[in-house]
Amino acid sequence: MNLDWQHFTPWASLAGGLLLGLAAALFILLNGRVLGISGIVGGLLRPQRGDAGWRLAFVAGLLAAPTIWALFAAPVAPRIAAGPVLLVAAGLLVGWGTRHGSGCTSGHGVCGLARLSPRSLVATLAFMGTGFATVFVLRHLFA
């Protein structure tokens, strides 16, 4: 296995993980809600009275953060090794899985595991196992 040292960013990754963990902890402590992106965005599709404001602010923050980051750091060109059809298919599959799995990777992997949720443990193991299997098949069997 070769490590791509040019794109290896342990400190930025650690800082991002710490910020995500802090945000998830503060969100559940201050709001009593799990910081799952699919649940927050999904709540905008059928908003309840007085519920849409914080959800819109959250989504606005998700969209504004990379823009603000770009003001202070050099932009990073994304490396996407897939065509538009594959990207759309992947997005639809992720959305379908999120709906049927009662949450996304951030909700289950970060928040659910922190709350010691058995359902989130099973979901996270399924996410990770499927990812590992996919990489193995694509890199070693179809390479």
Image (tube, rainbow, N blue to C red):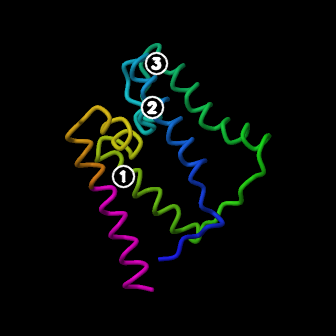
Sequence order check: which comes first, mark 1 or mark 2? 2
Type of amino acid under label 3: Asp
Q: State the CA–CA distance, disc 2 to disc 3.
A: 10 Å
Foreground label between 1 and 2? 2
Rendering quarter of residue 116: top left
Q: State the CA–CA distance, disc 1 to disc 3.
A: 24 Å
Residue drawn at point x = 48 percent, y = 30 percent: 22
Instruction: Estimate how packed mark 1 is, as few (under 14), some (14 to 19) or many (20 or more) residues with alpha carbons within 10 Å.
Output: few
Give the left or right position of residue 17, taking residue 109 as reference: right
Give the left or right position of residue 119, taking residue 37 as reference: left
Q: Position of residue 41 (x, y in %)?
A: 47, 35
Rendering quarter of residue 69: top right
The majority secondary structure of the magenta stretch comes to: helix
Question: Is 106 colored magenta in this rendering?
Answer: no
Secondary element under disc 3, as helix, strand or loop, is: loop
Secondary element under disc 2, as helix, strand or loop, is: helix
Return the residue at label 3: 51
Q: Is residue 55 above or below residue 72?
A: above
Q: Is there CB contact under 8 Å for labels 1 and 2?
A: no
Return the residue at label 1: 96
Q: Position of residue 75 (x, y in %)?
A: 75, 52
The quarter of the rendered structure image containing the C terminus is bottom left
Q: Which residues are magenta?
A: 126-143
Type of amino acid under label 1: Trp
Secondary element under disc 1, as helix, strand or loop, is: helix
Return the residue at label 2: 40
